[in-house]
Amino acid sequence: MLSKNLASEINTQIKLELYSAYLYLSMAAYFESENLPGFASWMKKQAGEEQEHALKFFEYLNDRGDKVVLQAIEQPPSTFKSPLAVFEQALEHEKSVTARINLLYGIAVKDNDYASQTFLNWFVTEQVEEEKNATQIVEWLKMAGDSANALFQINGMLAGR
């Protein structure tokens, strides 16, 4: 079994991963309303990944003999200023997820819980990729500036995810 602290924090992480999915679905809805289906598709796929992450934590708690306690999920924002603002918010959100994964890893180290450290290594690596992807899109949108043509090109690239 996990320490009470780590089990509690993993239960909170399940909620936060599901919130991430909810946030990205809200962002997808924004992009749909802006007639940017490639951006929307990218965000929907991102939402699906976040749900998978929540389930990994869910299964891990069960595998370790701990109880999953689902928590209420906050309503995400539903209005956004621009595609750039959306991805800047997504990047900041991913940085906060990285901080949470690091917190969990730190608890596992303090607890000498080697199984949890091994489990969490996957998430540490995943967060590097998540931040890289969001940063890249932020940079593309900054380079695009006010160019509708560039925005539509990015939209097309994101549709291919």
Image (cartoon, rainbow, N blue to C red):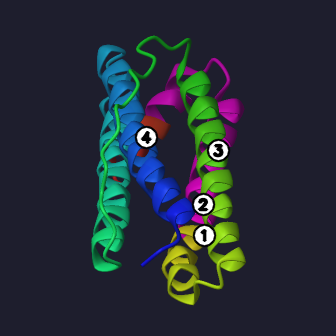
Q: Decide: few, some or many residues near mark 3? Use Cα within 10 Å; few <14, some 14-19, many ≥20.
A: few
- Residue under numbered circle 3: 96
User: Mark number for residue 20?
Assistant: 4
- Distance, label 2 to label 1, CA atoms, is 7 Å
- Distance, label 4 to label 2, CA atoms, is 14 Å
- Distance, label 3 to label 4, CA atoms, is 11 Å
- Residue under numbered circle 1: 124
Q: Decide: few, some or many residues near mark 2? Use Cα within 10 Å; few <14, some 14-19, many ≥20.
A: many
Q: Secondary structure at mark 4?
A: helix
Q: Quick check: 36 above or below 108? A: above
- Distance, label 3 to label 1, CA atoms, is 13 Å
Quadrant location of residue 102? bottom right
Magenta range is: 126-153
Residue 122, can we see it? yes
Q: How many tags in the picture? A: 4
Q: Amino acid at mark 1?
A: Val
Q: Nearer the viewer, mark 4 or mark 2?
A: 2
- Pinpoint residue 68: horizontal percent, then vertical percent: 30, 57
Residue 39, can we see it? no
- Pinpoint residue 74: horizontal percent, then vertical percent: 41, 25
Residue 113 horizontal side relative to residue 8, left or right: right
Q: Are marks 4 and 2 in contact (CB under 8 Å)?
A: no
User: Mark number for residue 101?
Assistant: 2
Residue 107 horizontal side relative to residue 150, left or right: right
- Identify the residue at image location x=47%, y=37%: 153
Q: Earlier in the sequence, mark 3 or mark 2?
A: 3
- Identify the residue at image location x=61%, y=23%: 85
Which of the image's four quarters has the N terminus? Answer: bottom left
